[in-house]
Amino acid sequence: MRKVYSLAVLAAVLLVLEGFYNPKTKIVALTQNKIEKATFFPAWNDALLLQSQPDTLTWKLLGDIKFVKKKDKTYGEVMFPVVNTKLRLTNKRKVAMSGFIVPIDNKNYALSKNVFASCFFCGKSGPETITGIKFRGETPKLRTDQYVTIVGTFRSNETNVDDWIYHIEDAVIVKGAK
């Protein structure tokens, strides 16, 4: 009860103080380990919402997936993924995820739950244990099995059997890069 009361008082004080600020006043916010400038607006403004921490995805959550058999014009009968509700709500949101780097070719990488020797290409796991990565800007040079944490925009795929089930786009390595 005491916490609820304290939060209510804090919210009321912030709303009162909000009236004393000039909308053009700059504030500084810590976001993704860097300092960014933002214009002060009411707390529900998009500029402040962008400062929130990314959702953390786990391999357990990505592994909570079902498959249904459907017809595909190219391959005949194929098992299509059915992504769980929580991941559907995470679509197009900023996420953080950790895993092992698996090279796909000279310029493309994937993030894997397992090291290369146990990734799903070798038959030890399913396709839900890997996610495609599209880096922001230039693709960094990475080592096979390098353990990293990346932040980017999450996207799931339930319709294209020639593509990853999961993607992290506009990705930036926040931990583990040399």
Image (spheres, rainbow, N blue to C red):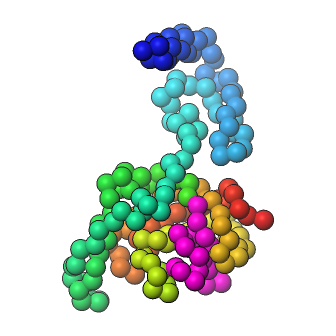
Residue 104 is at least partly visible in this image: no
- Horizontal side of residue 78 vs 35, given as left or right: left
Res 84 visible: yes
Where residue 142 appears, as percent x and y from the top left, is 70, 73
- At 38% from the left and 68% from the top, the residue drawn is 157
Does the magenta portion include 105? Answer: yes
Residue 22 vertical placement versus 36 (above, below): above
Q: Please state which of residues 59 and 174 is positioned toward the viewer in this rendering.
A: 59
* Residue farthest to the bottom, as pictured: 75
Image x and y of residue 144, in percent: 66, 78
Q: Is 20 or 133 nearer to us in this picture? A: 133
The verdict on residue 17 being magenta is no
Above or below residue 60? Residue 105 is below
Q: Is residue 84 left or right of residue 8?
A: left
What residue is drawn where x is 65% and y is 84%? 106
Which of the image's four quarters has the C terminus? bottom right
The residue at the point 27 percent across, 83 percent down is: 78
Give coordinates of residue 82: x percent, y percent: 29, 66
Q: Between residues 105 and 121, which one lies in front from this camera angle?
A: 121
Q: Is residue 76 left or right of residue 29?
A: left
Instruction: Count up the numbered dots.
Output: 0
From the image, which quarter does the N terminus lie in? Answer: top left
**Which span of residues is magenta-colored?**
98-119
Q: Position of residue 175 (x, y in %)?
A: 69, 57
Residue drawn at (65%, 63%) of the image: 148
